[in-house]
C-alpha cells in the first residue's frame, strides 16, 4: 500500500460534523477501490483540510475520491516519517501542521538536519515534532507537531531557520472519530 495525501480548501468553511459526514458518504467508494482513510486534519476555521489515505496506487485513490466529488488536483504520493520513538498515541497528540514547499526537489535528510540543529528552539517553545509526509517529487512536505499553539511552532521554525510556508492548528478526525459519532 502507498500513502497518499489530499490537500483541500473549503469556501464556505466546513465543520467537524461535515468531515464525519464526508467520511460516511465516501466509505463505500473508498472500500471498493481499497483506499483506507487514515485521518483528516481540519484547520480550526474549517477552511482547509489535509487527508491521509493508504491505497494500492494513486489512480485507485483518484477514482474513489472523484466518485464522491472531491477535487483531487492536490493529491500526492507521500512517504511517512515518524520521529524516533513516536507511536500512534503520540500522533494522536498532534495539533499543528507545518506546510513546506520547494521549487526544486530537496532531500528529506537536509531539511531534517536543519530542524535537528534547531531542536533547542522547538524545546524552548514546547514544540514536539511527530511526523512528516514527504512528497514523492520531493517538492512538498507536511509536518505534524504537538504544541501549545500554531504561533509557538511558527516562532520555533523561524528561530531554527527551517523553511516553511504556513503553520496552522487543526483537529484530527479519523475512523475512530466516526465510530464514536456512530455510537
Image: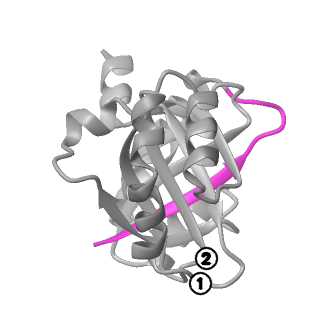
Nearer to the camera, 43 or 176: 43
Name, please, the residue furthest toward the top: 183
**29 inside magenta stretch:** no
Say which residue label 1 marks: 105
3 is within the stretch colored magenta: yes
- The residues colored magenta run 1-14
Vertical relation: 42 (above or below) 72: above
Q: Position of residue 178 (x, y in %)?
A: 38, 28
Question: Which element carries disc 1, helix, strand or loop?
Answer: loop
Q: Earlier in the sequence, mark 2 or mark 1?
A: 1
The residue pinned by badge 2 equals 139
Q: Residues within 10 Å of mark 1 (few under 14, many from 20)?
A: few
Q: Where is residue 174? Give x, y as percent.
A: 38, 36
Colouring convention used in this rendered image of the protein:
one colour
Q: Residues within 10 Å of mark 2 (few under 14, many from 20)?
A: some
Separation of marks 2 and 1 at Cα, in angstroms? 5 Å
Picture residue at 60% right of the left edge, 45% below the top: 159
- Say which element carries label 2: loop
Q: Do we see residue 61 in this rendering?
A: yes
Is residue 170 shown above or below 50?
above
Which is more toward the observer, 91 or 123?
Answer: 123
Instruction: Judge whether 55 appears above or below 39 on screen.
Output: below
Do labels 2 and 1 touch, CB within 8 Å?
yes
Q: Quadrant of residue 153?
A: top right
Count of all numbered marks drawn on residues in the image: 2
Residue at 16 percent across and 47 percent down: it is 85
Q: Position of residue 127 (x, y in %)?
A: 43, 33
Quarter of the figure with residue 73: bottom right
Residue shown at 35% from the left, 57% from the top: 31
Whole-percent x, y for residue 148 in the image: 49, 21
Residue drawn at (52%, 36%), measured in percent from left and top?
A: 96
Say which quarter of the image contains residue 116: bottom left
Amino acid at each position: 500500500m502507498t500513502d497518499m495525501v489530499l490537500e483541500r480548501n473549503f469556501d464556505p468553511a466546513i465543520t467537524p460534523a461535515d468531515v464525519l459526514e464526508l467520511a460516511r458518504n465516501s466509505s463505500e467508494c473508498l472500500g471498493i477501490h481499497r483506499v483506507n482513510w487514515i485521518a483528516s486534519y481540519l484547520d480550526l476555521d474549517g477552511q482547509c483540510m489535509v487527508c491521509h489515505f493508504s491505497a494500492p496506487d494513486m489512480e485507485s485513490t483518484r477514482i474513489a475520491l472523484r466518485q464522491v466529488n472531491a477535487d483531487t488536483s492536490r493529491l500526492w504520493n507521500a512517504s511517512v516519517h515518524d520521529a524516533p520513538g513516536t507511536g500512534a498515541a503520540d500522533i494522536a497528540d498532534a495539533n499543528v501542521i507545518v506546510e513546506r514547499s520547494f521549487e526544486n526537489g530537496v532531500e528529506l535528510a537536509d531539511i531534517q538536519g536543519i530542524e535537528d540543529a534547531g531542536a533547542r528552539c522547538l524545546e524552548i517553545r514546547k514544540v514536539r515534532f511527530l511526523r512528516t509526509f514527504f512528497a514523492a517529487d520531493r517538492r512538498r512536505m507536511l509536518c505534524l507537531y504537538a504544541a501549545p499553539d500554531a504561533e509557538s511552532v511558527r516562532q520555533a521554525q523561524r528561530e531554527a531557520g527551517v523553511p516553511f510556508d504556513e503553520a496552522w492548528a487543526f483537529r484530527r478526525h479519523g475512523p475512530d472519530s466516526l465510530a464514536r459519532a456512530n455510537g
